[in-house]
Amino acid sequence: ITCVRCDRPDGMFEDYLKRPLFIADYPAIDGNILEDNGHIYLYFSRCCFEHCVNGLEESWIYVTELDGAMENILYEPRLLLKPEQEWEGRSAPTTRRRWNEGSFILKDGGKYYMIFSANCYLERHYAMGCAVSGRPDEGFIKQDTNPITCCTDEITGTGHGCIVRTDTGLMAVYHGRTPASEAELAGGETRVPFAAAVQIKDGCLSIDYLNARMLTENC
């Protein structure tokens, strides 16, 4: 994982570091950043490749902190999440793998809500969960209401999302598959972006995935 920069959001971005932010003895993917109270937190996933836990390969989510110039990490990455809920293992019988990856963090009302994805992105049970903490760098507890998106007859493989604030409230944006997109390519590689309303009530985050709206034909 490295950083690029630009003075406008639509490019072109410059690879100013020309090196990774850190060197680890495992592949790191799915980086995302939270700026909070003068700190810059980097969240990422340890790829499941060759990371064997009790006979299954697993991906885990970590956090570290960046310096103000976003050139170096300030401490060794700390483990935040790993697969432990039943729904996170629905791909395991066919893949021999379990995932926690694709994290995104939202601060709201003094709490930190981390959405993440589990199961194989190629399978219908790929979905998102949420973990909550009072701090951005530790203590995340997974909701008992997970998963917060699920496959339906019309949409499957709903995962790897983010949350944005709009004039009408919080919205989750994530990808999934429809019968039409799965038919387009063998194996269902064509994914479709969706948006759905997000609600936070009593410290629990939910996504109205049953009323998700398709954004484009494919992505």
Image: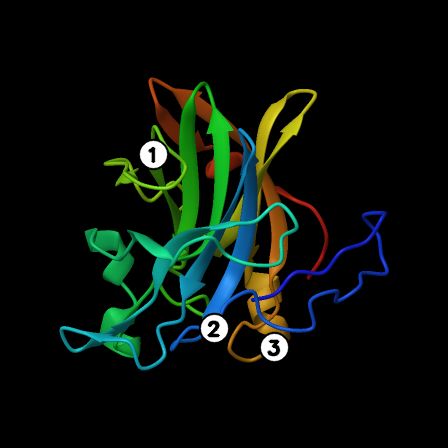
Q: Nearer the viewer, mark 1 or mark 2?
A: 2
| Rendered position, 113 above or below 65 | above
In this view, the residue in front, 53 or 26, is 26
| Rendered position, 151 above or below 54 | above
Estimate the spatial distance between the alpha carbons at disc 1 and disc 3, rounded to whole Å: 37 Å
Q: Amino acid at mark 3?
A: Leu
| Rendered position, 7 above or below 200 | below
Q: Amino acid at mark 2?
A: Ile
Q: Is residue 50 left or right of residue 34?
A: left
Estimate the spatial distance between the alpha carbons at disc 2 and disc 3, rounded to whole Å: 36 Å
Q: Is residue 118 left or right of residue 183?
A: left
Q: How far across and down, in percent of the image, does residue 10 sit?
A: 84, 52
Identify the residue under disc 2: 23
| Quarter of the rendering occupied by the N terminus | bottom right
Q: Coloured how?
A: rainbow
Estimate the spatial distance between the alpha carbons at disc 1 and disc 2, rounded to whole Å: 28 Å
The numbered mark, 1 or 2, whose residue comes first in the sequence reads: 2
Q: Residue at position x 51%, y 77% from top?
A: 187
Q: How far across and down, in percent of the image, does residue 188 sit?
A: 54, 72
Identify the residue under disc 1: 132
Q: Secondary structure at mark 3?
A: loop
In this view, the residue in front, 105 or 183, is 105
Disc sitting over residue 148 in the figure: none
Visible residue check, residue 154 = no
Q: Secondary structure at mark 2?
A: loop
Identify the residue under disc 3: 185
Q: How far across and down, in percent of the image, does residue 7 sit?
A: 85, 48
Visible residue check, residue 107 = yes
CA neighbours of label 2 inside 10 A, class few (<14), some (14 to 19), many (20+): few
